[in-house]
Amino acid sequence: MEVMLRKTSFIDYPGEISSVIFFTGCNLRCPWCHNRELVIGGDEKGAVLLNQALAHIKKRRSVLGGVVLSGGEPTLYEELPHIIASIKDIGLPVKLDTNGMNPTALENLLQEAPPDYIALDLKCAPERYGELFKTSAAAACAGQTEIALKQSATLVRDSGIAHEFRTLALPNVDETDIEALAPLVDQAPWVFRAFKTGNCLDPLWDTFADSKVEDVEKLVKRAKELGKNAIGGNLGGEGN
């Protein structure tokens, strides 16, 4: 299996210096996603074998505080429990980034090889998730994806594992989306980050303006009004 490896990150695992393993393939097609090569595949320059990535991580375990599994969407891989176990055998904690669209795999993972930290992306109001699919046929299943997102959020909340929720301050996300997402969120951090253009999956999104500080603050304010532990994150933007 080939993956992408970010050898050092200071922002992906809260409070830790980490390495990030990126998996190719995704079950969503978010038009703003910066990880175009990971989502559609076929042009993974710099890809390495998973075993090579793990060997590099093992070599640097004395300076790392954790490993992040991101994508793409890691839960699409049946090998994920084994990968998490292999990293824990090295002696490092594991953070999982997920979009929540695969609750069955997430539930199995929590039973077989639970990560030490989970970040669940909340992209827009659950009923709008049909906008995040490649085909109209897939979009027609938006009701099922709304259920999947809610199931994943419940699994994360009830897991007893440290976690956070993440939302981008996108041009088409406003306070009504936050109100619709709020029931999925407990008192774990709900991190809001700025949207930044560049290499978006849909080139049209590269013509939009980057988020401003006040765009993030507006969503944070509404989430706090709803009783959530909302914070503004790195204004450099995120890809997912």
Image: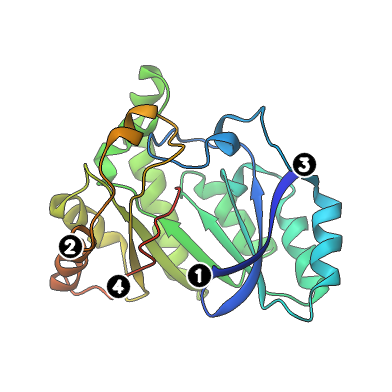
Q: Quadrant of the N terminus?
A: top right
Label 1: how many Cα within 10 Å (few below 14, some 14–19, many 20+): some
Q: Amino acid at mark 3?
A: Glu
Residue named by callout 4:
231
Residue named by callout 3:
2
Residue named by callout 1:
159
Q: Earlier in the sequence, mark 1 or mark 4?
A: 1
> In 3D space, how far apart are the residues under numbered discs 1 and 3 (Cα atoms)?
30 Å
| Residue 178 placement, left or right of 202 | left
Q: Is residue 122 above or below residue 1?
A: below
Quadrant of the rendered structure where residue 226 is?
A: bottom left
x and y, in percent, of residue 18 in the image? 64, 70
Q: Earlier in the sequence, mark 1 or mark 3?
A: 3
> In 3D space, how far apart are the residues under numbered discs 2 and 3 (Cα atoms)?
40 Å
129 or 70, which is in the foreground? 70
x and y, in percent, of residue 55 in the image? 86, 61
Considering the numbered disc 3 on the image, is that residue within a helix, a strand or a loop? strand
At 65% from the left and 45% from the top, the residue drawn is 23
Q: Earlier in the sequence, mark 4 or mark 2?
A: 2
Number of the front mark, 1 or 2: 2
Residue 214: image tag: 2
x and y, in percent, of residue 79 in the image? 75, 48
